[in-house]
């Protein structure tokens, strides 16, 4: 047996030389009949390696391929040995049309010569009832040698591919983690989710099917491993950091080289010369330019991005005092539903308003996040009356048109009826029982003035004008003039009094002389009249008073102020009384007149001494 | 003679037209303000100032419009000017208090001497015109009292004249000094407000000076020396420094 194997190897060693001398030919094979939609294999076998080119065929779809495989077989039959090298190219195809399907010959270019395979015709029969699964599991990697060819492009790599490189804050994009491989591989210990820092992420199921792509002339099997909807949370250059994962890769195990020429033979994968080795693979960093919202966000913008709509309703049109009611605002559409802020609702003051509750339903359709978010604003009416809630505005940014959109509801009106206290929370609220402060609902500057006081010239100050100071001077001159005039007036008045004062005594004496003459001639009535006149006239001149303003009370007052003894004034009034009495008396005695005359002369003398 | 008369007529009529113009511009400004066109309202109000006319209400409305268009610094300037034109203008004082909530610089003022405080409170009872009128009226009263004292024929008239005269003379001196004080503020204003969003205060009047501290718009200042385009300022907590004159607005 041992001998036999040796022989076989020796022959096999030489078979390579034999092969090169063989005639090159290619044969195409395909099943004779297939069903519509069924997958089948179309294989071209030949004894040389080359570049294959299959013309496109109407009614047939190439799903995968070409997978090339290379095999060498040696047969020993009845003492005769045949060694065969075969090289096959396999396409996985699907027929789409009923009828005869003719696959034209394929061209294979080996070195510089072109070879042509045979034409194959396939009978396609009616559609199969159970359509075959189009999802192919696990990749079929036939070219195992690729893993061992150094110097070529990497056999396996991961890519993060975002659907957009430039988005607005809050705008959705889809990011895929895709594997490109030319070897059979699987992740060691499962695959983690990419963290995507700075983004809100939502996982979508990647479709499991693998595909074949030619990249730089190399054939890769690709598969989307993860698919996320990403929503950037802030503006700026956002970098998706390299994501590292561990993969198991088949790799040739280097053996100790010996002189044994057969070692190469054992290195064939068939003989278990390949081992699975874990390899760390990292993605390249990807930069996404996140644009900030444009200026001029309208009122009611709460960070919504996408194409949204809003409506709002009131839970009840009328409630009783202390009952709860709520406003329900629903925002739906495609966009960043989960990141929306609650729109602002202006509740009428004097109600108990609570924080809005939010509930959301988000699903994905066609790689986009859509959904509905509902905000419920609970409120408890405290006072009866009719109230209005001003229209609720909701604005969002539409990245497609790069504009803000706003919708506004109409205004809500609800009535609160008087209730008989609230049973539901045990508190009885009686209006007026609780003193309420007048609260400041909002503070603001006071409004403008509608009318202005008279406008004045700028920098116009009265005291900078000479007229102002001149007016002081004018008033002062007026003062001096008035003072001077008054002075002259008073002086003149005083002069008149002084002369009168001086002449008073003389005048009195004159009158007394006249009285004396009357006394001597016996004219009693004239005597008393003249005496009285003399005394009154003297007092008037001496005291600076007009005769008309003279009265007894006034005379007493002045005499008192001039410190004249009381007996003098008593004497004065006794003489006056006597004169008046005697003047109209029926009998006049001479002696009476004599004594009165003497008394009057004495009185005037005394007064002259006392009054200056 | 005829020419002077014509000149006077011309002066009076031009005065009247400016007043009428100011009134209509004021009404237009108010209309723009009500419509929310605050910037245009300010320029309308500014037209009145450009005509050389002013009033406390005008400055007050400008302050409101400046506040509404987010120019906090200017709103402080205008409210201060309104208060300067009429120290007893209550709405301006209230809005100034409200606007000061928006200011970035919160400065602790050095407590003033009570006499100084009383003095400024007393001076601010009336605007300049009223003070000047009062002092003239009191001057006349003093003179009348003097006459009464000199020529009064009775003792009580003389006494009343004497005491009333002394009191009115005292008040006259006070009101005249108040008027002069106001006048000095008008002719040589020393108060200012920062209007640039932020200003670095330097230790000397040049860019190479050391940075002392940073002030923000709306902060009140007292100005002092002036060197080229630099002004020495003093803030209410007593610190001093130099700033460029275009960063502040004199009240």
Image (cartoon, coloured by chain):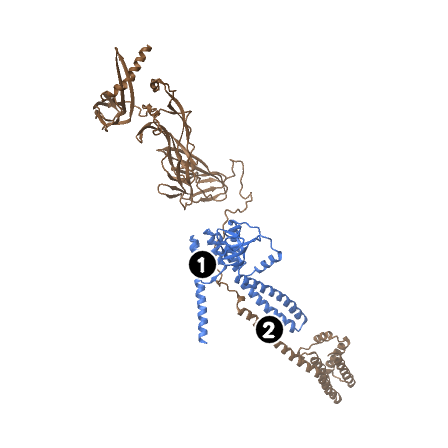
Residue A297's label in the rendered image is none
Image position of A88 with respect to A569: above or below: above
Camera-nearest residue between A97 and A117: A117
Q: In which quadrant of the rendered image does the C terminus of chain A lie?
A: bottom right
Q: Are marks 1 and 2 on the same chain?
A: no
Relative to residue A330, is residue B218 drawn left or right?
A: right
Residue tagged by mark 1?
B46
Q: Element type at marker 2? A: helix
Q: Nearer the viewer, mark 1 or mark 2?
A: 1
Q: Quick one: which residue is furthest to the front in this view?
A: A259
Q: Is residue B109 left or right of residue A296?
A: right
Q: Quadrant of the N terminus of chain A?
A: top left
In this view, A29 is above or below A196: above
Chain letter, blue: B
The local secondary structure at tag 1 comes to helix
Q: What residue would you read off at disc 2? A: A479
The image shows residue B207, relative to residue A466, as above or below, that is above
Residue A229 is situated, as x and y percent measured from the top left of the image, at: 39, 34
Tell whether A182 sits left or right of B217. left
Q: How far is the residue under mark 1 from the one under mark 2?
A: 46 Å
Chain of the residue under label 1 = B
How far across and down, in percent of the image, does residue A119 sit?
20, 24
Q: Nearer the viewer, residue A441 or B45?
A: B45
- Please report, as a chain letter, where disc 2 is located: A
The reply to whether dot 1 and dot 2 touch (C-beta < 8 Å) is: no
Picture coordinates of residue B37 (x, y %)? 42, 53
Among the chains pictured, the one given brown colouring is A
The relative height of residue B162 versus residue A202 in the rendered view (above or below) is below
Image-quadrant location for residue A235:
top left
């Amino acid at each position: 047996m041992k001998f036999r194997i040796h022989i076989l190897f020796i022959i096999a060693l030489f078979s390579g030389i034999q092969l090169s001398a063989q005639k090159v030919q290619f044969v195409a094979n395909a099943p004779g009949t297939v069903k519509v939609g069924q997958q089948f294999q179309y294989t071209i076998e030949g004894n040389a390696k080359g570049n294959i080119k299959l013309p496109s065929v109407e009614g047939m779809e190439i799903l995968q391929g070409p997978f090339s495989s290379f095999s060498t077989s040696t047969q020993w039959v009845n003492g005769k040995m045949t060694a065969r090298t075969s090289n096959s190219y396999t396409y996985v195809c699907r027929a789409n049309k009923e009828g005869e399907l003719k696959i034209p010959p394929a061209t294979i270019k080996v070195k510089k010569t072109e070879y042509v395979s045979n034409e194959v015709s396939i009978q396609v029969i009616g559609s199969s009832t159970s359509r075959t699964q189009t999802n192919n599991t696990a990749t079929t990697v036939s070219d195992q040698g690729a893993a061992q060819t150094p110097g070529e492009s990497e056999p396996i790599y991961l890519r993060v591919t975002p659907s957009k490189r430039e988005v607005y804050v809050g705008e959705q994009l889809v990011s895929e983690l895709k594997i490109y491989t030319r070897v059979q591989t699987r992740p060691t210990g499962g695959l983690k989710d990419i963290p995507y820092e700075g983004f809100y992420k939502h996982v979508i199921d990647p479709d499991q099917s693998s595909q074949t792509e030619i990249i730089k002339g190399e054939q890769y099997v690709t598969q989307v491993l993860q698919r996320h909807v990403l929503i950037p949370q802030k503006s700026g250059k956002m970098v998706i950091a390299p994501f590292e994962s561990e993969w198991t890769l088949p790799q040739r195990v280097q053996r100790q080289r010996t002189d044994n020429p057969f070692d190469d033979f054992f290195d064939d994968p068939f003989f278990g010369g390949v081992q699975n080795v874990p390899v760390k693979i990292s993605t390249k960093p990807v930069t996404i330019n996140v644009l900030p919202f444009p200026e001029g966000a309208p009122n009611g913008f709460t960070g919504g991005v996408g194409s949204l709509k809003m409506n709002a309703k009131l839970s009840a049109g009328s409630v009783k005092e202390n009952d709860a009611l709520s406003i329900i605002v629903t925002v739906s559409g495609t966009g960043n539903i989960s990141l929306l802020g609650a729109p602002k609702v202006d509740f009428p003051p004097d109600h108990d308003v609570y924080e809005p509750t939010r509930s959301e339903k988000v699903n994905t359709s066609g790689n986009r996040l859509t959904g509905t978010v509902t905000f419920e604003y609970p409120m408890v009416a405290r006072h009866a009356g009719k109230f209005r809630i001003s229209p609720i505005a909701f604005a969002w940014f539409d990245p497609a048109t790069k504009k803000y959109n706003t919708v506004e509801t109409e205004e809500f009106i609800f009535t609160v009826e008087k209730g008989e206290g609230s049973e539901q929370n045990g508190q009885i609220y009686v209006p007026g029982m609780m003193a309420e402060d007048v609260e400041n609902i909002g503070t603001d500057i006071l409004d403008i003035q509608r009318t202005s006081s008279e406008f004045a010239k700028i920098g116009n100050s009265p005291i900078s004008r000479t007229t102002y100071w001149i007016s002081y001077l004018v008033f002062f001159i007026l003062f001096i003039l008035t003072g001077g005039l008054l002075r002259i007036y008073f002086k003149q008045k005083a002069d008149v009094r002084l002369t009168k004062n001086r002449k008073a005594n003389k005048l009195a004496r004159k009158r007394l002389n006249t009285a004396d003459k009357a006394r001597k001639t016996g004219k009693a009535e004239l005597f008393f009249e003249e005496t009285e006149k003399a005394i009154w006239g003297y007092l008037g001149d001496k005291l600076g008073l007009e005769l008309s303003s003279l009265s007894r009370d006034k005379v007493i007052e002045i005499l008192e102020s001039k410190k004249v003894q009381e007996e003098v004034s008593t004497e004065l009034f006794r003489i006056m009384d006597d004169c008046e009495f005697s003047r109209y008396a029926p009998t006049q005695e001479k002696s009476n007149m004599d004594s009165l005359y003497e008394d009057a002369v004495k009185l005037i003398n005394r007064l002259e001494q006392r009054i200056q | 003679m005829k020419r002077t008369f014509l000149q006077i007529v011309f002066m009076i009529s031009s005065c009247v037209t400016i007043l009428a113009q100011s009134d209509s511009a004021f009404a237009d400004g108010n209309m723009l303000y009500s419509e929310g066109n605050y910037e245009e309202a300010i320029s309308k109000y500014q037209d009145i100032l450009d005509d050389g006319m002013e009033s406390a209400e005008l400055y007050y409305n400008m302050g409101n419009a400046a506040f509404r268009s987010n120019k906090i610094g200017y709103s402080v300037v205008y409210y201060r000017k309104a208060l300067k034109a009429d120290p007893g203008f209550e709405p301006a004082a209230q809005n100034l208090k409200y606007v000061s909530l928006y200011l970035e610089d919160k400065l602790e003022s050095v407590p003033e001497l009570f006499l100084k405080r009383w003095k400024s409170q007393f001076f601010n009872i009336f605007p300049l015109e009223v003070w000047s009128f009062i002092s003239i009226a009191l001057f006349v009263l003093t003179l009348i009292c003097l006459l009464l004292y000199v020529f009064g024929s009775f003792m009580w008239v003389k006494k009343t004249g004497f005491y009333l005269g002394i009191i009115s003379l005292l008040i006259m001196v006070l009101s005249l000094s108040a008027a002069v004080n106001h006048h000095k503020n008008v002719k040589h204003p020393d108060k200012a407000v920062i209007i640039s969003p932020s200003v670095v205060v330097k230790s000397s009047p040049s860019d190479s000076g050391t940075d002392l501290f940073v002030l923000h718009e709306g902060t009140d200042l007292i100005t002092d020396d002036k060197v080229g385009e630099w002004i020495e300022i003093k803030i209410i907590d007593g610190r001093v420094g130099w700033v460029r004159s275009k960063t502040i607005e004199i009240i």
